[in-house]
Amino acid sequence: MPRLAHGVLARIEAGFDTVARALSSLDMASNVYFEELPTEPRTAVAVGEKYFLRAGNSLAATTVLVDRGSYTAVKVVATGARSGILDLLDFGASGSYARMIVERLAEAAGAGYEVLAEVDHMAREESRLLSEGRQEPQ
């Protein structure tokens, strides 16, 4: 069965504290959960939920920040719930949601960003494509 998840790996040209503060205040990305984890490198995780009319449903997104010193790595996976056989499409809403989070985070941090990888119809096997330095095969 096709997956509705969409993943984005991006690099935001700002320090971890700035991006984590932006993430914690970005409602669409952290209105369900936000936590900075006691790890090395520093890491934060957030879960947000937003209603998308075109999907006819709320979508959820998980965002992971990783401190890389001079920049912050951002990984976002957005997906929608399915309740029936007709829920095979979200009409691009999960991709829009994931990219919107990256764009708004960079804007709130006052920094530039670069999308390093994007995975549509993501399943567990494709999660390795969101590792830094890995690109989705063309």
Image (cartoon, rainbow, N blue to C red):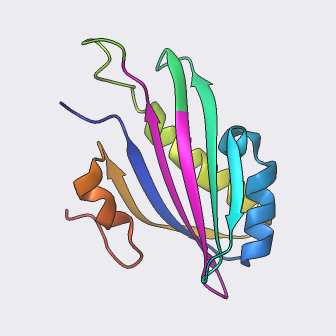
Q: Residue 74 occupies which quadrant of the picture?
A: bottom right
Quadrant in which the C terminus appears: bottom left
Q: Residue 110 occupies which quadrant of the picture?
A: bottom right
| Residue at the spot 42% in from the left edge and 25% down from the top edge | 81
Q: Position of residue 132 (x, y in %)?
A: 42, 76
The one of 84 and 18 positioned closer to us in this rendering: 84
Q: Which residues are magenta?
A: 60-82
Quadrant in which the N terminus appears: top left
Above or below, 62 relative to 51: below
Residue 33 among magenta residues: no
| Residue at the spot 37% in from the left edge and 40% down from the top edge | 5
Q: Position of residue 61 (x, y in %)?
A: 54, 42
The one of 89 and 40 positioned closer to us in this rendering: 40
Magenta region, main secondary structure:
strand
The one of 131 and 104 positioned closer to us in this rendering: 131
Residue 70 among magenta residues: yes
| Residue at the spot 62% in from the left edge and 77% down from the top edge | 39
Q: Residue 125 occupies which quadrant of the picture?
A: bottom left
| Residue at the spot 52% in from the left edge and 30% down from the top edge | 59
Q: Position of residue 69 (x, y in %)?
A: 66, 88
Above or below, 123 relative to 3: below
Q: Position of residue 70 (x, y in %)?
A: 67, 87
Q: Is residue 110 left or right of residue 6?
A: right
